[in-house]
Image (spheres, rainbow, N blue to C red):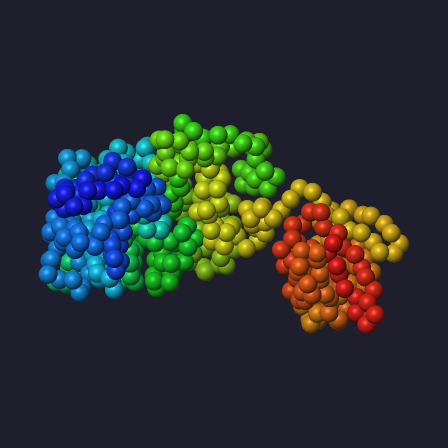
């Protein structure tokens, strides 16, 4: 990957051109030029990961950065303020756009060249990695004549690619389509595209007000960034227009919450919102070197809980001469939500988040990002590690789905815990519910009232749990891995929570009651 250029004999013009063309050929998405006191570090981002590419010596650094500013149309005399520019006609590749951004830092100007390849947008929705079910849902959404469709995701997750692919479908002679963008990332024949210029007062809000007087059928807003844009977009969608836009949120539920935070009225949002498409990008396994391996115990539990099927083998990265660490390219995970009447009523009536989650994921016929990701793991498109990397446990898994969270984090094992009695000596293997039931059986309220608790005798196990709940003394927890004298507080209300506090797995845990000379009992983890 690392390149060493002939900086002493080769012209700077040729070096810059070669760097950019080489990055394009490697399917890079960004080129970073990071100045330091003694050199210029060049990195390129491939498949979402920044990789070291070159080190430019100090005597060439200034000339190289100046060359980039010249070909991108920037002011080379201005080094104190950020600038934006674009590189044109450097390559003959169609659907390729090079956007340049400069930022003054302590050691000079940092420059980033973003390589935007819109060939995927022109190739159609069918080539974006959508499942058959999700593809059908998007086509159904595009047939609705009015309302707002939002494409959500973090920066660099392919939102613009998806929205341009949708515009290609809508672009017919019978429709007046107008876009408001900052900047216009891809020019499409037959579509009226407006470039926002905030410095002269041509903002998203002002432009949208003017657009509504242009008899539009479809309006595309590059990004909903502020409260004003959100409110105008929603109001436009309920007056007979189809509105497409992008928004920086993680999933469907977060998108609804974000719009409400932007002070969009609930009754308007409930009426206007038609669908939400959430997406994330994961690395694609190299098809030439991927290897099959057996699933681990917790992976099996994860597949069973999410996909409701047994998966015995998955593919894993290996690495070869045609990929980077076993990955080549990226594939998108999608979550497509069509807003039904129940969800509209829930938004309008301000029901609790957990109840809304239930409506969306249990009754809304939605393939979640986690489910879509695990399906792609089964298909061999990506690895389980990539899914674990991009899925947010707090955002993507509900508060009431503790079992799924445990499986996702690899804490749930399929070996039952055991307890050892001190007197009389007896070995028991309780089911998980045997431990949890006494706590959940009307005694949680009392537990919250005591300051701390202990166990006296584990004889039998249920009696021990009751002793814990009805004690007011401290419990000391020790183990041979070095976790000495941890105080267990009353909020630890279950066997699983106790073991999580100790950072120990649920399985193979042995508890022993020990008498202390100070009459304070302790629970020792052996």
Q: Position of residue 459 (x, y in %)?
A: 84, 56
Q: Is residue 234 above or below residue 476?
A: above
Residue 415 in the image, given as x and y percentages of width and height: 69, 42
Q: Is residue 397 above or below residue 322?
A: below
Q: Is residue 319 left or right of residue 237?
A: right
Q: Is residue 33 left or right of residue 411?
A: left
Lateral position of residue 412 relative to residue 167, left or right: right
Along the line of sight, which residue is nearer the eye, 408 or 501? 501
Q: Residue at x 51, y 33 (%)?
A: 314
Picture quadrant of residue 62: bottom left
Q: Residue at x 21, y 59 (%)?
A: 109
Total of numbered circles in the picture? Answer: 0
- Report the residue at 40% width, 51% height from top: 250
Please say whether residue 409 is visible from this viewpoint: yes
Residue 277 position in % (x across, y down): 37, 45
Q: Looking at the picture, does residue 295 appear above or below residue 526?
A: above
* Residue 167 at x, y percent in the picture: 24, 41
């Amino acid at each position: 990957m690392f390149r060493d250029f002939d900086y002493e004999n080769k012209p700077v013009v040729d070096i810059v051109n070669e760097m950019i063309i080489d990055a394009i050929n490697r399917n890079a998405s960004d080129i970073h030029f990071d100045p330091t006191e003694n050199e210029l570090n060049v990195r390129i981002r491939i498949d979402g990961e920044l990789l070291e590419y070159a080190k430019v010596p100090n005597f060439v650094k200034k000339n190289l950065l100046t060359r980039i500013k010249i070909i991108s149309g920037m002011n080379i005399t201005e080094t104190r303020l950020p600038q934006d520019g674009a590189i044109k006609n450097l390559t003959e590749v169609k659907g390729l756009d090079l956007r340049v951004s400069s930022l003054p830092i302590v050691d000079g100007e940092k420059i980033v060249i973003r390589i935007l390849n819109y060939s995927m947008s022109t190739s159609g929705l069918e080539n974006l990695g959508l499942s058959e079910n999700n593809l059908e849902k998007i086509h159904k959404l595009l047939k609705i004549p009015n309302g707002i469709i939002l494409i959500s995701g973090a920066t660099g997750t392919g939102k613009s690619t998806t929205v341009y692919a949708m515009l290609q479908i809508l672009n017919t002679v019978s429709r007046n389509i107008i876009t408001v963008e900052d900047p216009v990332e891809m020019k499409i024949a037959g579509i009226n595209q407006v470039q926002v210029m905030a410095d002269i007062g041509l903002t998203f809000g002002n432009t949208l007000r003017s657009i509504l007087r242009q008899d539009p059928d479809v309006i595309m807003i590059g990004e909903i960034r502020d409260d004003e844009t959100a409110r105008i977009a929603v109001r436009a969608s309920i007056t007979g227009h189809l509105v497409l836009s992008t928004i920086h949120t993680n999933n469907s539920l977060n998108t609804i919450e974000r719009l409400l935070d932007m002070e969009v009225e609930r009754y308007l949002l409930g009426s206007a919102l038609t669908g939400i498409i959430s997406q994330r990008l994961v690395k694609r396994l190299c098809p030439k070197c991927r290897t099959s391996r057996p699933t681990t115990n917790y992976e099996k539990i994860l597949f069973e809980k999410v996909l409701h099927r047994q998966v015995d083998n998955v593919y894993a990265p290996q690495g070869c001469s045609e990929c980077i660490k076993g990955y080549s390219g990226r594939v998108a995970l999608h979550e497509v939500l069509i807003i039904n009447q129940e969800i509209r009523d829930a938004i309008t009536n301000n029901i609790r988040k957990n109840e809304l989650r239930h409506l969306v994921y249990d009754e809304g016929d939605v393939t979640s990002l986690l489910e879509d990701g695990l399906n792609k793991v089964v298909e061999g498109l990506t690895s389980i590690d990539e899914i674990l990397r991009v899925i947010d446990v707090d955002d993507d898994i509900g508060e009431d789905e503790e079992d799924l969270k445990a499986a996702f984090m690899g804490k749930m094992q399929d070996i039952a815990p055991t307890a050892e009695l001190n007197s009389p000596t007896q070995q028991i293997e309780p089911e998980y519910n045997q431990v949890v039931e006494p706590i959940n059986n009307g005694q949680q309220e009392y537990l919250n009232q005591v300051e701390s608790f202990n166990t006296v005798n584990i004889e039998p196990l249920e009696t021990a749990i009751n002793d814990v709940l009805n004690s007011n003394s401290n419990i000391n927890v020790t183990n041979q891995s070095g976790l000495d004298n941890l105080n267990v507080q009353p909020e630890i209300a279950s066997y699983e929570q106790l073991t999580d506090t100790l950072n120990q797995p649920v399985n193979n845990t042995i508890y022993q009651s020990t008498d202390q000379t100070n009459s304070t009992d302790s629970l020792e983890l052996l």
